[in-house]
Image: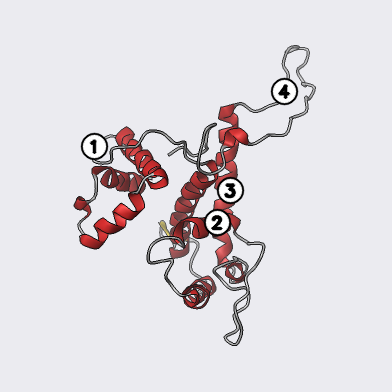
Amino acid sequence: MEEAGTEGSESGIGMAHLEMPSIPKRASSNASLQPDAVTPETLTSAQLHAVFDILTHYETYAEVELFKQPETITGYGYPFALHQNPDSAPSYATKSTTPLLAALLRSMVLPLPGVRDLPSEFWHVRFQGILTKLSEADLSESYDKGVLGVRKTLATAASVIHESVSRGILGGVSRGPRRNLNGYYDRTKASELQRAWEDLVHEATYGTLINDVFETAAASSDLEHHPPAVLAAIDYVIIQ
């Protein structure tokens, strides 16, 4: 998966089109030893990608950590209500407390078949109530005899998924030739698992993978009925 889009990206925000502010030159404390050393005014492509990765990492983990506080979900924005009053229509926060997570939910989860047909009450009454109770439950964040506590385990898993998907949404996916998901993938090699994941992301973005997966899952609960790329990508996610 290309975590930051390149020039020519047709989905998401291409990182090549972001203008970085100029970095002022600074006098080196070792000027006498390095007379020709100057601070570069622009970031290289690799440096830009590194900054992008660092910023998304810290933001996604910070957003997940905010769910320790019950008020976070009320400030989330649509589809979670700012104020819950059964006698009036729900109102929603206009500035989300968790902008990346909100964008992920709205762009990828809410449009899914089945999910998009759920009544609005499911989100701002039922699901919001569950999240509020979880944040009020005071779940353990500490290590218990060397084992991760419940909250820390859930938060870590959620953060990894949140970071990976959000980075893909922001960075975009470069459009290339269609991928053959029924090809051979050696599931004993890390490079093959990564290739399967990248093929899956490409086809989910530009192909019909999402609908195909739902149709296959509706017809059979056996994972082996999915294309080999899906099976290899599942291994990749588990390892990651």
Residue 39: mark in rendering: 4
Report how far apart the C-alphas of labels 4 and 1 lie in the structure.
48 Å
Specify which label sits upstream in the sequence, 3 or 1. 3
Tell whether 103 sits left or right of 157.
right
- State the residue in front, 200 or 49: 200
Identity of the residue drawn at 47% across and 47% down: 164
Whole-number angstrom distance, CA of label 3 to CA of label 4: 26 Å
Q: What residue type is labelled 2?
A: Ala
Q: x, y (%) of residue 233?
A: 32, 45
Q: What residue type is labelled 4?
A: Thr
Total count of labels: 4
Q: Which of marks 3 and 4 is nearer the N terminus?
A: 4
Above or below — where is 147 with respect to 187?
below
Residue 46 sits in quarter? top right
In the displayed structure, does residue 47 sit left or right of residue 3?
right
Pick the residue in front: 218 or 105: 218
- Dot 4, crowdedness within 10 Å: few (<14), some or many (≥20)? few
Look at mark 1 in the image and give the residue it sits on.
183
